[in-house]
């Protein structure tokens, strides 16, 4: 029983808990990263724990980005997904802290995300953080069967292939939402590492995993 605002509150609380737990329970390791990898790491992470995350709609974010479009390799435009350079500009130059971007165009998001009343956007959110970009993605799910079927039709998805999913709505549903955390991206943010390849816990190297 959660909407998009509940989803964002939980995501913010979870990320702050993870950061706080690492600061409290792994002080030597965090001091190492602060000394040798990123000298501003501890102060920045503590600031995140102590501050509220910013919130901006996708449409507002595009307007902010357009003011600096000349500096981007991929100019921002409404209807296109945000690039990493856009995400980092918003978090590092505009807001200076983590920021939720909400209400994306429905045409660049999955069919199961709840449509907003404007008919053009969905109740989706991405959490962007400085130095990394997107770290969490989530949405409120579409619980209305008729809207779900209509959206699947627009996207050319055959209902028979999703019968089990549609039954979840057909036989009773409720307002609900969810999100996913990028584990390696979270490790990048916690450690200050610049390359995601350096924080992969289980590297996928061909020929080196015996099953």
Image (tube, helix red, strand yellow):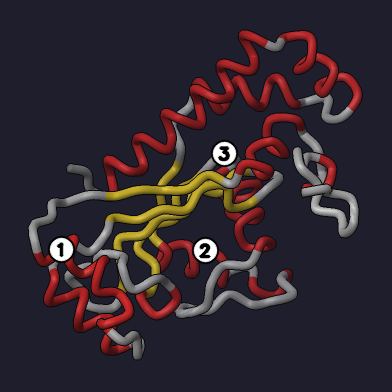
Residue farthest along the front direction in this orientation: 211
Mark 3 burial class by Cα count in 10 Å: few <14, some 14-19, many 20+ = some
Q: Position of residue 21 (x, y in %)?
A: 57, 16
Q: Mark 3 or 1 closer to N-term?
A: 3
Mark 1 burial class by Cα count in 10 Å: few <14, some 14-19, many 20+ = some
Q: Are marks 2 and 1 in contact (CB under 8 Å)?
A: no
Label 1: element kind: helix
In the picture, which quadrant includes the N terminus? top left
Name the foreground residue: 191 vs 47: 191
Does residue 133 appear to the left or right of 31 in the view shown? left
Does residue 173 appear to the left or right of 112 in the view shown? left
Label 3: element kind: loop
The answer to whether 120 is drawn above or below residue 116 in the figure is below
Which residue in the protein does label 1 denote?
Answer: 169
The answer to whether 153 is drawn above or below residue 35 in the figure is below
Does residue 146 appear to the left or right of 69 in the view shown? left
Distance Cα–Cα, label 2 vs label 3: 16 Å
Q: Mark 2 or 1 closer to N-term?
A: 2
Residue appearing at x 13%, y 51% in the figure: 174
Mark 2 burial class by Cα count in 10 Å: few <14, some 14-19, many 20+ = some
Displayed quadrant of residue 70 = bottom right
Name the foreground residue: 104 vs 136: 136
The answer to whether 195 is drawn above or below residue 82 in the figure is above
Q: Mark 2 or 3 closer to N-term?
A: 2
Which residue in the protein does label 2 denote?
Answer: 64
Does residue 81 appear to the left or right of 150 in the view shown? right
Distance Cα–Cα, label 3 vs label 1: 38 Å
Residue appearing at x 53%, y 72% in the figure: 81
Residue appearing at x 34%, y 36% in the figure: 9
Q: Which mark is residue 97?
A: 3
The answer to whether 200 is drawn above or below residue 62 in the figure is above
Q: Nearer the viewer, mark 2 or mark 1?
A: 1
């Amino acid at each position: 029983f959660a909407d998009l605002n509940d989803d964002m509150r939980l995501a913010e609380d979870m990320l702050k808990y993870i950061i706080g737990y690492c600061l409290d329970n792994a002080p030597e390791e965090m001091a190492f990263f602060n000394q040798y990898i990123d000298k501003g790491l501890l102060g920045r992470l503590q600031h995140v724990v102590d501050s509220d995350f910013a919130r901006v709609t996708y449409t507002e974010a595009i307007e902010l980005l357009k003011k600096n479009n000349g500096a981007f390799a991929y100019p921002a435009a409404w209807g296109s997904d945000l690039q990493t350079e856009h995400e980092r500009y918003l978090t590092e130059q505009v807001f200076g802290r983590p920021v939720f971007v909400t209400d994306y165009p429905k045409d660049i998001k999955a069919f199961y995300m709840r449509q907003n009343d404007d008919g053009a956007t969905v109740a989706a959110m991405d959490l962007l953080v400085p130095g990394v970009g997107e770290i969490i993605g989530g949405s409120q799910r579409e619980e209305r069967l008729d809207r779900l079927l209509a959206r699947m039709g627009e996207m050319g998805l055959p209902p028979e292939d999703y019968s089990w999913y549609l039954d979840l709505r057909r036989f009773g549903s409720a307002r609900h939402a969810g999100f996913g955390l990028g584990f390696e991206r979270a490790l990048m943010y916690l450690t200050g590492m610049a390359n995601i390849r350096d924080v992969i816990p289980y590297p996928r190297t061909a020929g080196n995993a015996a099953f």
